[in-house]
Image: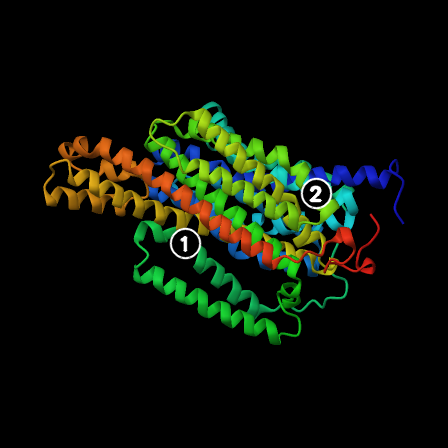
């Protein structure tokens, strides 16, 4: 039975949601806050920037590799318990990161923090359906998504303020009071939720194979742009990913209590929402990575300024998250997801006209359009993948959902970086060849550009005389390469939108025919 709006249970669930979202917000802040502080950390440790990038990569690799397993643990042992354990671990492992005497300890601390993050993300999503239903559930998922977008976008700006004011170590100390408050509120307001019918046997073979497969794929996508896609290590990792994924699928098909119930993938709406979520993260992560590089390398903005100039995309997301939720309630998740991805395509096509003289106002308009589209998608995909599956599978479904986010983001950065590098190299070749340089100089520049993760690295590696000659040409080529990549991204997003349209059935909860949870699977709020 539903309680009247004034009942204590209804009031407590919104307090519970605030605590749950605070835990998730700690994770998203951790994803977004370290990049701006890396130069200061490098100065303190006298280390190089490339080694410090692993402080970021270790966190995302561990989180992405463990998130499916963490979702299943929530179903088995309790989602609130996993949220609490994850919050404790995230805070506890922030201490060695904050006290790190060298780069190695910082990387280790961030990697261990990823264990806590992996436990928090699926649990925080899976705890929403037991407390909310109907329009309130959609609103709750919208709040969760708003916190996720806010953490990622505010993270760099907050990092700049904290790093300049208190020092970079406070990026980790701040997790301790946040975790303490979160634990107290969750313990007092959030009911436990688990799959009561599930056994307590853990599918260790399935767990091991999927963790290694996802880690191998994420590692390959992370390192591929810098070491080369033809590197024996990267090729071996891709082969291992395919082999282990097949092994995992076979294990899950025959396991008595599988890590992931493969019946999830028979729900077409679930598959459509996963595809839309992967596309959304592919587009946003790849676009953001390249545009920040362009703003810093071609336009001369600082890292903090570049982060601020990317904020219009988040503004657009916030504006349309409520609209996406309302459309999902009335028409189901398919319509706002498809329309949202199509709107994002339009914004990406606008970015295809970027140049060295493009105004920041033009960039802001394009980013707002993209954000409006992604805002339409955000709530429907979360609501469908977690709120419209049988509730006993909510934790596992949330784990798979967040893994699709991680893979989408990693793929976006890897694929779009590769495309931009290829287009930039071709564009620069024609300009530089006309500049009167010798074939040896041209070859040296091309090699530097291909083997660098950004334009500035390529230029810095050249001799001073050659550097001055090619800098202007390379800046123009880099801008053209990024703009062309945005157009390519628009085409890829459009094709993915068509796939989502075909994959996601017209049926929706609104017309009572969704392939989602049966009424008896869902408790009263």
Q: Position of residue 181 (x, y in %)?
A: 68, 36
Q: Kindly indicate whether the residue at mark 2 contacts the one at mark 1 (C-beta within 8 angstroms).
A: no
Which of label 1 and label 2 is nearer to you? 2
Q: Position of residue 426 (x, y in %)?
A: 26, 45
In-image side of 431 versus 367 (left or right):
left
Q: Which residue is mark 1?
A: 221
For the point 68% across and 49% down, the residue is 383
Residue 88 visible, this angle: no
As rendered, which of 269 and 259 lies closer to the eye?
A: 269
Q: Tell me if residue 38 comes above or below residue 194 in the rendering.
A: above
Q: Position of residue 192 (x, y in %)?
A: 76, 51
Q: Position of residue 200 (x, y in %)?
A: 69, 67
Quarter of the rendering containing residue 154: top right
In-image side of 276 versus 513 (left or right):
left
Rounded to the nearest angstrom, the CA distance separating label 1 from label 2 is 35 Å
| Other-residue count near label 2 (Cα within 10 Å), few / some / many at <14 / 14–19 / ≥20 | some
Q: Residue furthest top?
A: 165
Q: Which residue is mark 2?
A: 327
As rendered, which of 144 and 279 lies closer to the eye?
A: 279
For the point 44% across and 28% down, the residue is 304
């Amino acid at each position: 039975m539903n309680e009247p709006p004034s009942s204590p249970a209804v009031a407590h669930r919104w307090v519970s949601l605030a605590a749950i979202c605070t835990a998730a917000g700690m994770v998203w802040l951790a994803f977004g806050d370290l990049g701006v502080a890396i130069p200061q950390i490098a100065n303190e440790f006298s280390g190089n920037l490339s080694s410090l990038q692993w402080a970021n990569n270790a966190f995302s690799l561990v989180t992405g590799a463990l998130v499916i397993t963490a979702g299943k643990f929530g179903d088995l042992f309790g989602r609130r318990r996993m949220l609490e354990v994850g919050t404790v671990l995230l805070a506890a492992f922030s201490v060695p990161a904050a006290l790190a005497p060298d780069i190695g300890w910082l990387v280790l601390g961030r990697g261990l923090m990823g264990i806590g993050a992996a436990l928090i993300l699926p649990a925080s999503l899976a705890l929403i359906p037991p407390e909310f239903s109907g329009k309130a559930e959609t609103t709750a998922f919208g709040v969760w998504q708003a916190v996720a977008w806010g953490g990622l976008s505010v993270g760099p700006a907050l990092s700049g303020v904290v790093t300049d004011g208190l020092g970079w170590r406070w990026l980790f100390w701040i997790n301790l009071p946040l975790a303490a408050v979160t634990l107290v509120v969750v313990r007092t307001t959030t009911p436990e939720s688990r799959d009561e019918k599930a056994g307590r046997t853990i599918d260790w073979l399935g767990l091991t194979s999927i963790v290694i497969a996802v880690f191998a794929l994420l590692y390959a996508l992370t390192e591929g742009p810098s070491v080369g896609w033809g590197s024996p290590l990267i090729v071996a990792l891709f082969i291992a990913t395919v082999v282990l994924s097949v092994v995992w699928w076979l294990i899950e098909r025959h396991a008595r209590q599988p890590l992931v119930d493969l019946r999830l993938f028979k729900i077409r709406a679930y598959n459509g929402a996963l595809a839309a979520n992967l596309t959304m993260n592919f587009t946003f992560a790849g676009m953001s990575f390249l545009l920040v590089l362009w703003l810093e390398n071609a336009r001369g903005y600082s890292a903090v300024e570049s982060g601020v100039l990317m904020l219009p995309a988040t503004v657009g997301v916030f504006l349309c998250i409520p609209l996406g939720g309302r459309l999902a309630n009335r028409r189901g998740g398919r319509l706002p997801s498809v329309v949202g991805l199509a709107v994002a395509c339009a914004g990406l096509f606008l970015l295809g006209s970027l140049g060295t003289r493009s105004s920041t106002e033009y960039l802001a308009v394009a980013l707002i359009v993209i954000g409006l589209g992604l805002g339409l998608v955000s709530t429907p995909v979360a609501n469908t993948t977690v709120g419209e599956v049988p509730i006993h599978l909510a934790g596992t479904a949330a784990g798979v959902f967040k893994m699709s986010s991680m893979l989408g983001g990693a793929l976006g950065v890897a694929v779009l970086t590769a495309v931009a590098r290829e287009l930039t190299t071709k564009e620069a070749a024609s300009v530089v060849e006309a500049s009167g340089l010798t074939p040896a100089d041209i070859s040296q520049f091309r090699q530097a550009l291909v083997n660098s993760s950004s334009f500035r690295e390529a230029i810095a590696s050249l001799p001073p005389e050659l550097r001055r000659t090619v800098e202007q040409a390379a800046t123009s080529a880099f801008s053209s390469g990024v703009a062309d990549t945005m157009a390519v991204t628009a085409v890829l997003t459009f094709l993915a939108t068509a796939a989502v349209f075909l994959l996601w059935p017209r049926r929706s909860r609104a017309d009572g025919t969704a392939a989602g949870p049966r009424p008896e699977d869902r408790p009263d709020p």
